[in-house]
Image: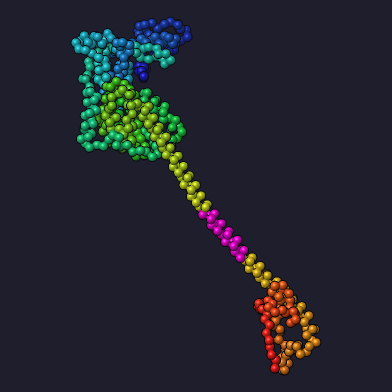
Amino acid sequence: MRHHRFFNPSERAPLRRPLSGDVGRPLGRANDENEGKPADEVRDLRDLIAWLRQRLRGEHTVRACVLTVEPVGPSDYLLLLGEADPSGSADPPRLKVRLDAAESEAHRSLTGESFDPATLVNRRIELRLQTGMRQRFGRGAGVQARVLALLSIGEVPIDGELDRERTLQRLRLEGRRFGPETWVEPEDLHHIALIAAECGDARRDVEHVLRPLEESGLIRMHRIWANFEGPSAERSLADAFERVSELHRDHGLSATLVCRGGGPVEGFRALNAFVTANAALATAVPNLIVGLGHAGTPPTALDAIAARSEPTPTAAAVLVRRLVEGTGARAERALAAFDAAVTDDLEAAARIALAQATHAFEAAVQDLVDRADRHLRQLDRAVEQSLLGHLAKATTTAAVPQAASDPAQLPQLGDGDGAPPQEPGLALVTVAETNRVITQYDQLRSDSNLFLHFHDGTVFVRVVPISVAFH
């Protein structure tokens, strides 16, 4: 907790003195003993601390507001004092004072009424303090204060539950929309606003959960510091919600976290105020998530209007972490579905391409087979015709000398006017069963199957004997 160190330049201790003077002489306990010493005297540190202790010791009457009350032992309490009047300071003054059982009993005796120090929270008081300096282990010197007397106590604050119900009733009469129905599931949780006290356990708990996500680049935190206690808390929270609205216009926030640590019920008064609730609803605050107090803290008006209400700041931060993890899981499922769709499309396209290639290959092979068959047929026909031509020439050459002995059977070489002889029409006669060449009539047999080969084709014939009468 922050403690004040009082320092007045006009009253600072002398730090230097001539070397010829006394070096180790103590300052003494009276203030006037040191005020008359030269400003350049050199003193030991313990002498300086003793001088400061004398300067800070005294009695003071102050007006302040009690922020928190903490029990210390069976009957003593620590009061955290803050500013009595609202102010816009970002660093309001704070001072812890000790209220002993004797001062509490003295106040009871003076007023004649029962007195519970817990009822001082969020009240303006006037009290007389005794201040001094104390050494804190590892933290240096600080101011300590003790209550000497409670001079006056302000009016009893309105009960927090009544404040909450009055605020919610007013919002309902105005037709305002709030609560879980305002939640919009974020698709890509990235920009997050955090409203918290700058110094407190709530900020530490939230950042302990979310800082790893921020450092990895999954989210970006926008921190807004606000006061949750004291007279200026309502205005501070309203300004914080206005800042959230500006961030939402600039970055498009996915969620807004409002976190506050635990404490007495009276410390949550600002969260039940209409000013705070109205600011949270009047501005563009997306997906309001609150984590206020501890599990036993009564719900506030801000809990009722929030889209999500968690019992502690840590639980609120864990909710945000689960949302980020859900976004990652959805992204993984989407990528897996995309990969599967791409794979299916590629496989379908590959099957179509393979079928087309196979069909084209088969068509090309069939075309090659057809062309090869045609070429083979042409080649067979050419070989056959060449062979028949050679056989015909050989048969004609062998038959001409034999036919010359019978001039009556020689073919006519031409007509009477000397025209050139015509080429014989019959080229070759073969037996169908044995392919034997028939060159003479005597080689024919009755019912023989013959092929008559001409220059322009082949015909199949059967030998049938007939009787011909010559007259």
Q: Residue 189 sits in which quadrant?
A: top left
Q: Which residue is at the front of the view, 160 or 334?
A: 334
x and y percentages locating residue 418 in the rendered image: 73, 92
Counting the numbered discs, the total is: 0
Q: Is residue 90 visible?
A: no
Q: Which residues are magenta?
A: 352-370
Residue 367 on the magenta span = yes
Q: Is residue 327 left or right of residue 159?
A: right
x and y percentages locating residue 236 in the rendered image: 30, 29
Q: Is residue 448 left or right of residue 127?
A: right
Residue 42 on the magenta span = no
Residue at 23 percent of width and 13 percent of height: 115
Q: Is residue 30 left or right of residue 109?
A: right
Q: Residue 256 sits in which quadrant?
A: top left
Q: How is the image coloured?
A: rainbow
Specify the principal SS of the magenta part: helix
Q: Which residue is at the front of the view, 374 or 402?
A: 402
Residue at 80 percent of width and 84 percent of height: 401
